[in-house]
Amino acid sequence: MSELFDISGKTAFVTGGASGIGLMASHAFANAGCTVLIASRKGAVCKGAAEAINNELGREAVHGFAVDLASDEGVAAALAEVSSRTDKLDILMNNAGATWGAPMGEFPRSGWDKIMNINVTGVFMLTQALLPLLEKSACAEDPARIVNVGSIVGTRAVGNNAWSYAASKAAVHHLTKILSNELAARQITVNAIAPGPFPSRMMAYVTENEELAALARADVPLGRLGEPSDIAGALQYLCSKAGAFVNGAILPLDGGMSTKS
Ligand SMILES: NC(=O)c1ccc[n+]([C@@H]2O[C@H](COP(=O)([O-])OP(=O)(O)OC[C@H]3O[C@@H](n4cnc5c(N)ncnc54)[C@H](OP(=O)(O)O)[C@@H]3O)[C@@H](O)[C@H]2O)c1
């Protein structure tokens, strides 16, 4: 069983890997014996997170650098940074994302464009740019893996004033499915996780307010928020031999929210 779930020796790139769900993923991949590249706009934060994990593990497992994935220049820079550290990529986790909230009638176009740009366009453009590196590690016995980060709000029609965010996450789910069709012949699987509420910078306004946190927990049938082990378990499955035949799936990590009646 441990061999079935073994991902040691793989190289993973986690966008937004220094905070929230991305940081949980960076820890999980590093603990599982991967080399992990993490990047976001705040390069110093990425370097700091990498150093902290490396100190815990006692090996240079994680490497952090700065990129802004919302621009063509940023995507090109990401390709250059990743290529300077590895000649093949086993796992791409498209996790970086942002949100914007404003009531109907007050929602600005800038809040629409900014969110679509990083949450959807960034995912597609980065995936496209990194395909040659993913193809170098891809084979029938052990496909290369892309894990996109969708959301419960991409599945459930709840806007919560985050109009562009919800639409962007539904787009991530659909993009995941069409990319899984397109890339299967190259032995690259494309799946998404669709998290419910997890503590993170984006969710701090909820999780750091006891009243809102209680409401968030009450909305989850299992009655709790997501934890690092929930992210680790899903990634270990999707990125190992155990998950090699899973393609085009949107895996709910939401304690049952998506099927709640
Ligand atoms: N937490 C939840 O409950 C929840 C639920 C469902 C889905 N999600 C999804 O999970 C993913 C991670 O979010 P999170 O909740 O962990 O929030 P978070 O802590 O705010 O993480 C978002 C990450 O994205 C990075 N990022 C944002 N814009 C970027 C850009 N233009 N270029 C590069 N990196 C960028 C941020 O780093 P910089 O600021 O340094 O750029 C940060 O590391 C997102 O896709 C989010 O939609 C979260």
Image (cartoon, rainbow, N blue to C red):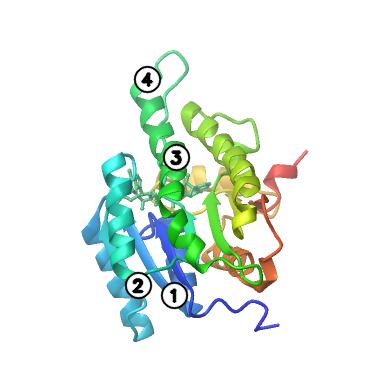
The residue under the point 71% across, 50% down is 256
Residue placed under numbered mark 1 in the picture: 30
Residue sitting nearer the eye, 142 or 252: 142
Mark 4 → mark 3, Cα distance in angstroms: 15 Å
Residue placed under numbered mark 4 in the picture: 109
Q: Earlier in the sequence, mark 3 or mark 1?
A: 1
| Residue 119, numbered label | 3
Mark 1 → mark 2, Cα distance in angstroms: 7 Å
Disc 1, disc 2: CB below 8 Å?
yes
- Would you say the beta carbon of the disc 3 residue lies within 8 angstroms of ligand 1? yes
Image quadrant where one finds the N terminus: bottom right
Residue placed under numbered mark 2 in the picture: 62
Q: Earlier in the sequence, mark 1 or mark 4?
A: 1
- Would you say the beta carbon of the disc 1 residue lies within 8 angstroms of ligand 1? no
Please tell me in which quadrant of the rendered image residue 241 appears. Answer: bottom right
Viewed as shown, does residue 168 lie left or right of 218? left
Viewed as shown, does residue 257 lie left or right of 227? right
SS state under label 1: helix
**Can you say whether 223 is above or below 153 in the image?**
below
The residue under the point 49% across, 71% down is 28
Q: Which amino acid type corresponds to the residue marked 1 in the rendered image? A: Ala
Viewed as shown, does residue 256 lie left or right of 163? right
